[in-house]
């Protein structure tokens, strides 16, 4: 999905939230300069070789790292990024780019869990994220699924990931895609953290039913020491201690 994530976000980023715990939740309208936020990034093979020590020294405290896409693609840089980020003191999590029109949600959740998306309570491993957004391939913006079909696919993925890892997956999406393709489904937000994609000075309107964003991807053209070229920049809606609490499920 590396090329997928790269292009689709530039076409469809409009809003995505992550609801973690009530204790970690802050005001949903906080902007990039808000005091109680923690800076992070998300990366894939498109960022090339990353100096994670420089990234951490630049103040980046967490990263979501592309692991898988569909049922046959594993990002070639995932293993090195995942280990090196951890060793540099960056709290990291894996993410999976969803392809709902090629296999069941359970199949893709199992593929993620078996290829880098597992979880351990080590203070540096976040629950993995489901990246669900506009389809960059053939098959239609909503992957050819009805709103009911999309809800069922997502629920199948989430249930399987929780069964495999004991954790509620983070959901990365945009407000426009979510409301259109799931029919403004509110079901997941009671438990699943929302990672909001919206490149703007404020998060704006959240997906239907989401009470708060937990992560916010606010630009695709960020710059960070240790990474050549642009990188997606994000905020966690809380301080580092609350991010570690999410990582440890405490």
Image (cartoon, grey):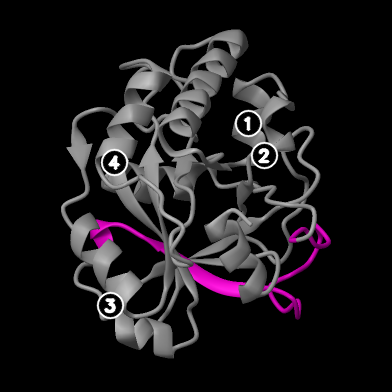
Q: Which residue is mark 2?
A: 175
Could you say which quadrant of the image residue 238 lies in? Answer: bottom right
Residue 35 at x, y = what percent? 75, 80
Q: Which mark lies nearer to you, 2 or 4?
A: 4
Are there few (<14), some (14-19), or many (20+) residues within 10 Å of tag 4?
A: many
Q: Which residues are magenta?
A: 24-46
Q: Which residue is mark 4?
A: 68
- The residue sitting at the left extreme is 76
Which one is nearer the viewer's eye here, 221 or 235?
235
Question: SS at mark 3?
Answer: loop
Real-space CA distance between mark 1 and mark 4, rounded to the nearest whole angstrom: 21 Å
User: Residue 30 lies in magenta, yes or no?
Assistant: yes
The reply to whether callout 1 and callout 3 are in contact (CB within 8 Å) is no
Could you say which quadrant of the image residue 86 lies in? Answer: bottom left
Real-space CA distance between mark 1 and mark 3, rounded to the nearest whole angstrom: 32 Å
Which one is nearer the viewer's eye here, 96 or 248?
248
The residue sitting at 28% across, 47% down in the picture is 116
The residue sitting at 63% across, 46% down in the picture is 193
Q: Return the mark for residue 178.
A: 1
- In the displayed structure, 129 sits above or below 152; it is below
Residue 69 in sight from this viewpoint: no
- Which label's residue is closer to the chain start, 2 or 3? 2
Question: SS at mark 1?
Answer: helix
The reply to whether callout 2 and callout 1 are in contact (CB within 8 Å) is yes
């Amino acid at each position: 999905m590396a090329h997928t994530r790269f292009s689709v976000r530039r076409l469809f980023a409009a809003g995505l939230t992550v609801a973690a715990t009530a204790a970690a939740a802050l005001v949903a309208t906080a902007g990039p300069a808000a005091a109680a936020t923690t800076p992070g990034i998300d990366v894939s093979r498109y960022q090339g070789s990353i100096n994670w020590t420089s990234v951490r020294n630049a103040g980046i405290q967490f990263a979501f790292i592309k692991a898988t896409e569909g049922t046959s693609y594993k990002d070639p840089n995932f293993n090195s990024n995942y280990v090196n980020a951890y060793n540099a003191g960056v709290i990291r999590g894996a993410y999976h780019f969803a392809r709902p029109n090629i296999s069941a949600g359970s199949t893709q959740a199992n593929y993620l869990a078996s290829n880098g998306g597992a979880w351990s309570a080590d203070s540096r491993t976040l629950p993995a994220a489901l990246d669900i957004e506009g389809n960059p391939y053939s098959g239609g913006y909503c992957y050819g699924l009805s709103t009911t079909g999309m809800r069922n696919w997502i629920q199948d993925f989430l249930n399987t990931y929780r069964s495999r890892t004991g954790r509620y997956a983070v959901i990365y999406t945009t407000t426009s895609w979510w409301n259109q393709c799931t029919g403004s489904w509110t079901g997941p937000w009671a438990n699943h953290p929302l990672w909001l994609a919206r490149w703007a000075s404020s998060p704006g309107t959240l997906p239907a039913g989401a009470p708060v964003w937990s992560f916010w991807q606010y630009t695709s053209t960020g710059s960070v020491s240790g990474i050549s070229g642009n990188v997606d920049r994000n905020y966690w809606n809380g301080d580092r201690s609350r991010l570690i609490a999410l990582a440890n499920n405490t």
